[in-house]
Amino acid sequence: MSKLRFDAIEAAFKKRAAEYPIPEGRPSEYFGELVFNREKMQKYLDAKTLHSLLDCIDNGKPLDLEVADGVAAGMKQWAMEHGVTHCSHWFQPLTESTAEKHDSFMEYDGKGGMIETFEGKNLVQQEPDASSFPSGGIRATFEARGYTAWDPTSPVFILDDCLCIPTVFISYTGEALDYKAPLKKALKAVNKAAVSVCQLFDPEVNRVQVNLGWEQEYFLVDDNLYSARPDLITTGRTLMGHGSSKNQQMDDHYFGQIPSRVQAFMKDLEIMGLRLGIPMKTRHNEVAPNQFEFAPIYGECNLAVDQNMLIMGVMKRVARRHGFRVLLHEKPFEGINGSGKHNNWSLQTNTGVMLFAPGKDPMSNLQFVTFFVNALEALRRHGSLLKASIASATNAHRLGGNEAPPAIISAFLGRTMTEVLRKLLTVPDDTDIVIAGKHKYDLGLVEIPQIFIDNTDRNRTSPFAFTGNRFEFRAVGSKANCASAMIALNSIVAEQLNDFKAEVDQELAKGTDVKIAVMRTLKPIIARIIDTVCFDGNGYSEEWQKEAQRRGLDVERCVPKMILEYVKPDSVEMFSKLGVFSLQELQARNEVKFETYAKLIQIEARVLGDLAINHIIPAAMSYQSQLLKNVAMMKSLFPSTWESLSAPEIAIIKKIAAYNSDIKVKVDAMVDKRKVANKIDDAYQKALAYYEIAESFHAIRRPIDKLEEICDDNIWPMPKYRELLWIR
Ligand code: ADP
Ligand code: MG
């Protein structure tokens, strides 16, 4: 990379940055500026409309069309004051990104002119011609069209000139075609189940909110370099590339000084996020070079999911203004860390109690232990399903790669909570659980230390870690829609809480005291989880693989096989009992997942084959020709000594020949396998065939990376890792 090129990039970046000045005022002043939030509702809606809308948002009351007309009028006025000309339903089809179709406000006014209109019916429902979205055959079998319906619990926002309305996307027969509809059902199920358990302890509780705090990891690469890598452009990751001599081994990138160009990007992104009502809080360098992270303050799960989907889109746009491309792929570069999206998950009551945190008195501590233990039991029962919820072709590269949790679902408790649980197994059922330090040391009590020293313990090797007042689900991929993990997690916990409550009720029916009934029900559960799903050791170790197998945990690594878990009887029963998914929806969605998996690997296989054959082999051959010419000239000039003089070149020539032929043979074999796979009709079998094909990529890549090492730098056809990975 010449300095000139860098300078040109930097100049362009400065120009772009100047075009997007920092807004006036403090961040707290422009926070939510582009969102139709409660403050805007107060300002733009009349009292009656406002009241009905809030009743709909807060209490799930239906909204009639007249009220919707009033809301739409207020929104239109607000939007037009911001120069908005279009509106769109904004939804999350099963594609891992969001979808929008813009319609302008323009209509004929009937007097020969035009007028801007936006009515309740435009707000509430739309029928996008959605026949090209993946549906797993649901729409083909039933109704050709799907429709989108407004989700009033997630506020409307402005992006550029468009008023975006968060919606669910469903078929006419009611099946979900998106992530939001089932997420809302799962959140409703866990709310209901958790409220019912809470009422054992506090009758005041009538709502339990799920909180989600995501931490988004990503890479940045220079836009120009990105454009010269067909693999990055088409697959989001590098399919080849020799490791940079310096990458993350010095640990100097993690929390290091943020490069100024990146800082400018982050600033711009934060401003956009804040204006869109996303409470951007933390930013830092991550472990790998060019890898970064940001996280907002956690919030209500459905909204937090929308905000994550929104900001992933915004990131891509803001990055380009700064001469970058953002890579959300879980594993853009081999040999260095990939990216994840930790999902910090907690439950909170309307009375302000965090259900995964110890309380003030023995009863609230028992409530905490109840939720804690039931969450872990849900994990024990449905760990494989939780794994399926984060399984994808792209995330597969990251799991188990000694940088991210292994493909085994277990929970890290920390020493404190492990001891609390073990102690609970040994004490009488009426024992108090107290906060240590407030009482005299008493052997008879179960004590929770006031400060959770162990829970700040950073066991990064666990996929599901308790961190003091929440669980951190770390296996979620950086590119994923968090809804997938949140649907599974909240559903399995809802089911377990329901089952737990039913058992406690049986005890209560016998006239048992609440506290004793809860303890009695908890103890066998604790005994079941403590030596199965709970594991505080090193999740990256080989021993854990063996130990997990011995414990009967699922160690499957093949993505299509993982996904099958959704249609196993336990999962189907759980989802249908809760009303989250029907069997038919589960089958249809799996079909989509298998197809997506196969297509993605197919694209990668094609790109890898093309690059190998028409970029790499020709480049290596042209260098080989140069060497051959050199040897031939040596021979004519130095007839007696040429052989020893040319020995190094000859060695390279032979190596190139060997690598080239190795590449050709392996690419041909891969193409043959693809032909076979493409003829398979069954989506699952096809995905399995493509799984095998993906497994062969590495063998093709290896000789390519070797060639990169020995060929002349000038002829190498693509930017190398050492260029891609360091932002000046
Ligand atoms: P880490 O050290 O794990 O990187 P951070 O503090 O950077 O942690 O991020 C933690 C994330 O967890 C933030 O998004 C934060 O808002 C979120 N979080 C904190 N408390 C809770 C909670 N009770 N429930 C859900 N999320 C939470
Ligand atoms: Mg974290």
Image (cartoon, helix red, strand yellow):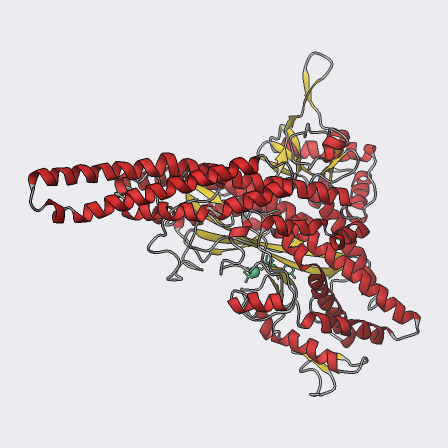
Identify whether 540 is placed above or below 172.
Answer: below
Q: Is residue 40 visible?
A: no
Identify whether 282 is placed above or below 635.
Answer: below
Rendered image quadrant of residue 55: top right
Rendered image quadrant of residue 406: bottom right
The residue nearer to you, when weighing 82 against 534, is 534
Number of numbered discs visible in the structure rendering: 0
Q: Residue at x 27, y 43 (%)?
A: 713
| Image location of residue 348, percent across then percent down | 72, 60
| Image location of residue 139, percent across then percent down | 73, 32
| Image location of residue 308, percent across then percent down | 60, 47
Q: Residue at x 81, y 46 (%)?
A: 60
Q: Residue at x 74, y 65 (%)?
A: 374
Q: Quadrant of the N terminus?
A: top left
Q: Is residue 19 visible?
A: yes
The residue nearer to you, when weighing 333 against 250, is 333
Indicate the quadrant of ligand 1 in the picture.
bottom right
The residue nearer to you, when weighing 677 against 456, is 677
513 sits to left or right of 215:
right
The residue nearer to you, when weighing 179 against 447, is 179
Rendered image quadrant of residue 8: top left
| Image location of residue 561, percent across then percent down | 62, 50
